[in-house]
Image (cartoon, rainbow, N blue to C red):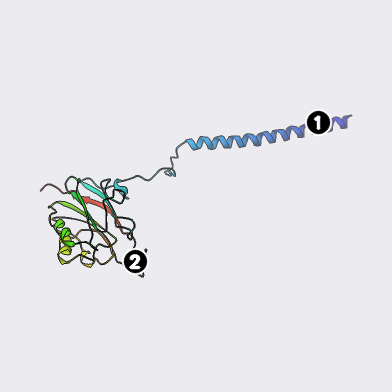
Amino acid sequence: MRIAGAIKFVVAVAAFLLTFYVISQVFDIKMDSNLGKILARVPLDNGAHPTTKAPKYRCGISKICPEKHFAFKIASGAANVVGPKICVDDNVLMSGVKNNVGRGINTALVNGKTGELIETKYYDLWGGDVVPFIEFVKKITDGTIVLMATYDDGATKLNDEARKLISELGSSAINSLAFRDNWVFVGGKGIKTKSPFEQHIKNNKDTNKYEGWPEVVEMEGCIPQKQNE
């Protein structure tokens, strides 16, 4: 009888220990799960913010512009398929979506003091006439910010007079702009130095990204606001 009682006692203790172990494991799992939910609600304060989005600056550029500067982002066209895009101070001035771009040189004129749009124009310099483009550039007034981007081809009809006028706006690359090159430029009427805002990619069959056209050229930056003289 004593042996039978001892066996029952051992079995009972073993069953109790097994039950306790199982309960403790389940409890630990639930605690871990609850702890994870709690931590998920607590913001991390160790400098790491994996869910925090990068700040969005004007025109989507990668930095904030200083006071009295206009943010800009400009892209040339992609082959003869996607038109160029010009943005100043978070305002898209020209794009395919706005349906105001076309083959040739696309130009946006902006008031250098206020940043307000004055006019947008594009001139077909492959199949069109360069004279209207020349007259347009001649009429640009002092203090105007000039943004230009090519689409498809912006050079075939350019002559020496047109190139000289664009050079006077601050361009360094306009004299070497050739058939189907991609080019973006930001200058100004009355500028006294060459503009730092210019990108140019040559049309080269060995390096072109698209068949017959180079890759898109993009540029962003901060344009100083024109101060009262």
Q: Nearer the viewer, residue 194 or 16?
A: 194
Residue 67 horizontal/vertical position (percent): 22, 45
Outermost residue on the left side: it is 229
Residue 50 in the image: above or below residue 34: below
* Image: 114 above or below 76: above
Front residue of 110/4: it is: 110
The amino acid type of the residue labelled 1 equals Phe
What amino acid type should be assigned to the residue bearing mark 2? Gly
Mark 2 crowdedness (10 Å alpha carbons): few <14, some 14-19, many ≥20: some
Residues under labels 2 and 1: Cα distance? 90 Å
Residue 116 screen position, x and y as percent? 20, 45
Q: Is 142 situated above or below 11?
A: below
Residue visible at 84% across and 33% down in the picture: 7
Characterize the local packing of mark 1: few (<14), some (14-19) or many (20 or more) Cα atoms within 10 angstroms. few
Task: Determine which residue is flagged by label 1.
Answer: 9
Name the residue: 14% across, 64% down. Answer: 161
Q: Which x, y percent locates residue 25?
A: 65, 37
Residue 191 visible, this orientation: no
Q: Is residue 173 above or below residue 97?
A: below
Q: Residue at x 27, y 56 (%)?
A: 102
- In percent of the image, x 76 and y 32: which residue is there? 13
Residue 212: image tag: 2
Q: Element at badge 2? A: loop
